[in-house]
Image (tube, helix red, strand yellow):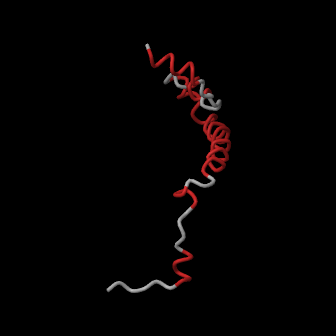
Amino acid sequence: MAPKKSKALMDSAAIPDWILGQGVEENAKELQAALEQEWIDELMPRYQGRWIQNVICYATMLSRHQIELNAPLLSAALCY
C-alpha cells in the first residue's frame, strides 16, 4: 500500500505553468529578446574572424532579426 501524501506536500507538487501551457508565450518572448542581442554581442569580438572564414557571419547576424510568418506565402511555397 502506497503511503499517503500530506496536503502540504500535494500543494507544493502542483503542476508547473509550463506543463499547463500558461505563460509560455510571455516567457518565450522574454527569452528570445534576451538571446537575440546578448549572445552575438558577447561572441562577436572573439569569433568574428572565424565566422567570416566559415561563411556564417551573415547568417549569424541575420539571427538577430525575427522572421514573421506570412501564411499565404508559405502555403504557396509548399504547393510547388
Q: Where is residue 22 in the image (x, y as percent from the top left)?
A: 60, 55
Tell me if residue 76 comes above or below residue 38 in the rendering.
Answer: above
Q: Which one is nearer the viewer's eye here, 58 or 69? A: 69
Q: In which quarter of the image is residue 66?
A: top right
Question: How many marks do you count on the picture?
Answer: 0
Q: Single out the residue that lies furthest toward the top.
A: 80
Q: Which one is nearer the viewer's eye here, 32 or 11? A: 11
Tell me if residue 29 comes above or below residue 19 in the rendering.
Answer: above
- Residue at position x 67%, y 47% in the image: 30
Q: Position of residue 7 (x, y in %)?
A: 54, 83
Q: Where is residue 13 in the image (x, y as percent from the top left)?
A: 52, 73
Left or right of residue 6: residue 42: right
Left or right of residue 36: residue 13: left
Q: Position of residue 67 (x, y in %)?
A: 61, 28
Q: In which quarter of the image is residue 61?
A: top right
Q: Which one is nearer the viewer's eye here, 80 or 31? A: 80
Tell me if residue 16 comes above or below residue 36 in the rendering.
Answer: below
Q: In which quarter of the image is the N terminus?
A: bottom left
Q: In which quarter of the image is the C terminus?
A: top left
- Residue at position x 43%, y 85% in the image: 4
